[in-house]
Amino acid sequence: MAVQGDVSEHVDALKMSMQALKIDGTAVTVRSTEDMRGISGLVIPGGESTTISRLMLASGIHEKVLELAKKGLPILGTCAGAILLAKEGDTQVSQTNTKLLGLLDMSVLRNGYGRQADSFEADLKITEIGKEPFKAVFIRSPIIEKVWGDTKVWVRRQSEIVGARKGNLIALTFHPELSGDLRFHMYFLKTILDSSRIKSR
């Protein structure tokens, strides 16, 4: 989705991942509901969650995402995208009247680590994407405070929840597109392949 935020880096990572996996596909920049016709998966990028939410509502994308999610569309939300996937937010979310999608049973703390100056990198162990640690980039990132129901903790940084998942819906509080490591994007594309929405060569 390309209404606002860290879009081009995701597009580049998806293109390189499709080449690596020999997938015939195109990374489409979604700015309207028309752009969503025939998509096989959706990335909601990092950026400013309130702005992204308002633009999604104004364009009709918000309701379209909910419709496609119910049909099983794989969705990856990173940083601000993770906030928007959540069912509950903190006081910052409510004070800014940010409309959440509510697709994942989890609550999030916006700007969980503070300001931009508090950004950092951390090595995360995630067995589903490989044995080597993943160097995650945290920039004004949220923290997932808790999950419940069918939503499960997927990634931790020490005791903090930094990734959650429910079926084809994945939320990451960090920026995998800035790491130079394609494993998360490749994993997401494989999730789409498993949902039989695209085919590899």
Image (cartoon, rainbow, N blue to C red):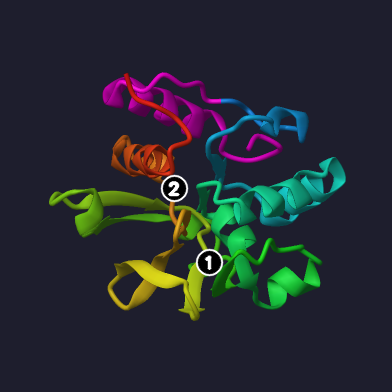
Q: Is residue 65 magenta?
A: no
Mark 1, secondary structure of its residue: loop
* Residue that extends furthest to the left in the rendered view of this protein: 131
Q: Residue 45 is drawn in which quadrant?
A: top right
Residue 43 visible to an observer of this rendering: yes
Q: Position of residue 74 (x, y in %)?
A: 50, 47
Give the residue type that dot 1 points to.
Gly
Reading the image, the residue beneath label 2 is 175
In front here: 8 or 88?
Answer: 88
Q: Is residue 27 left or right of residue 136?
A: right
Q: Position of residue 142 (x, y in %)?
A: 52, 65
Q: Amino acid at mark 2?
A: His
Residue plotted at (32% across, 78% down): 159
Residue 24 occupies quadrant: top left
Q: Earlier in the sequence, mark 1 or mark 2?
A: 1
Q: Which mark is residue 114?
A: 1
Give the x, y percent position of residue 57.
82, 50
Q: Residue at left 34%, top 28%?
A: 17
- Front position in the image: 148 or 144: 148
Judge whether residue 25 is colored magenta. yes
Against 131, residue 145 (above or below) is below
Q: Work out whether 93 lies above or below 17.
A: below
Region of the chain picked out in magenta, as a range: 1-27
Residue drawn at point x = 34 percent, y = 24 percent: 200
Q: Is residue 51 visible?
A: no
Describe residue 50's horizontal placement relative to residue 88 as left or right: right
